[in-house]
Amino acid sequence: MDLLPKFLKDIIDNFNLEQVVLWIKEIFIFLFKPQKFVTLFYQQSIKKQINQLIFYTGLLLLTFFSFGYGNSQQQFYKQLFIVFFISIPFVLINLCSFYFLSKIRSKVWKVFSFIYISWTFFLIPILVFSYIFLKTENYSFLFLSNAFNSIATIYSLFIIWSVFSDSILRIIFGYVLNIFLLNIFFLLIALVFRDPYSNTKNLDPILNEYEITFSQIKSFSGEPYSFRQSVNYEEKKIQNEIGFLDNDTLKYYGDEHIRILRNLYNNNIKYIDSVKPKLIFNRNREMVSDLSNHFKVMNSYFDYYPCDTCLVKHKKIIRRKDSVVIEVTKEYLIDKPYHKNYNMYQNKIDKIIKGNEYGTSPQLLLEFLLKPLDLLAEQMEWYTGETSSILIN
């Protein structure tokens, strides 16, 4: 409680147990019977309404600090600002809608307080499930966090019209107008804050850490597939090549490239050893370990002669005049033990990508709502493909 400003502590100290129990019960009324909650809430005096809002804000902030999101008054004010910031676009959108379709004067406080309460309530499970996701790295909790985010959006854009209007036709028009204004709002955001170097598309912290960490790991494109050695007896030369399978294309790299590749492997191993202790997420630590082991094993491949059972091609060039073999080329598949660690890494990143797709699937609602903006943006040369992701993430 020491983190709370004095004026908030004074107000909370005046709350009695009966009020607190009633307000907690009304949370469930809001979730399942928002119309009844609106009736109960707005029949009170403004002072009591504000006190109830402060209590709900206190619950949110208690959740915020209890789950380790912050421990200072600065972070307290920052979190309070976030609630207001999230509420603002929905407040503005609904005020415009009610201005065109209803009486604005009697709705300003109601619009603001309803949306503020919506985001205050739903931010609690959003924070809780986000915290559990960060601790467990289980994408089911990211799904739940995003699901509550989508529900809050539904309340802010649609449920609000259902509770404040009795006309079915006006409610439908309100829905349509809110979707239109939502697209206009984010179109303006995209125009004003357009930055070709920003990366707002993916805010999954696990994938973000992965992308930042693995962007520094260098290798040839594709996966090591085969090793080819040509021995020219006339010129007394040995030519070694390694083949990398990139999609369906097999590319060969000669001795100089093999030296470069081995240097890359050594540098990658050093980099991974330095960065691994700094990684936050176990998934990424496991993947860098797999890659480090892969680089170590592949680096050792060139120190030994390939196994005879891996031979897939054997070509001889014979001089016709005396039937002397002048060149022999052998190609060997790089056997399974050398692929083991890479395959483990690949399986883990595939699981993360699938988990991310599942965890962010509730955002499809927001993608659908912003579809008009996407269609418009496709026709405009300045569009970078990131507009819809501003809201989604």
Image: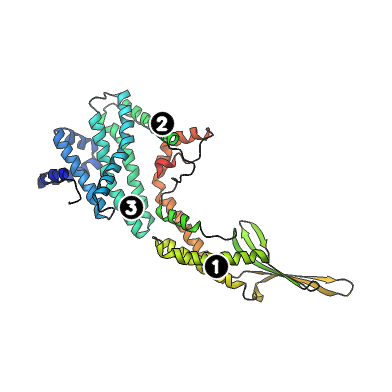
**Which is nearer the eye, 32 or 341?**
341
Residue at 54% across / 70% down in the picture?
A: 296
Residue 172 on image: x %, y % = 34, 29
Q: Circle 1 sits on which residue?
A: 266
Give the residue number, with chain letter if any, for mark 2: 184
| SS for dot 2 | helix
Q: Residue furthest right?
A: 321
Look at label 1 and name its amino acid.
Asn
Tell me, yes or no, whether the two marked residues, 3 and 2, touch with CB atoms within 8 Å.
no
272 above or below 199? below
Q: Amino acid at mark 2?
A: Ile
The disc label shown at residue 116, or none: none
Q: In which quadrant of the rendered view does residue 152 lie?
A: top left
Q: Residue at x 31, y 31 (%)?
A: 94
Nearer the N terminus, badge 3 or badge 2?
Answer: 3
Q: Earlier in the sequence, mark 2 or mark 1?
A: 2
Q: Position of residue 318 (x, y in %)?
A: 83, 71
Specify whether 172 is left or right of 215: left
- Say whether residue 309 is left or right of residue 180: right
- Residue 130's disc is 3
Q: Looking at the picture, does residue 347 appear above or below residue 95? A: below
Secondary structure of residue under mark 1: helix
Q: CA distance from mark 1 to mark 3?
A: 37 Å
Q: Quadrant of residue 244?
A: bottom right
In percent of width and height, residue 377 lies at 49, 34
Q: Earlier in the sequence, mark 1 or mark 3?
A: 3
On screen, residue 59 versus residue 246, left or right, reads left
Asked if marks 2 and 1 touch (Cβ < 8 Å), the reply is: no
Q: Position of residue 393 (x, y in %)?
A: 40, 45
Q: Is residue 204 above or below residue 374?
A: below
Q: Is residue 66 above or below residue 274?
A: above
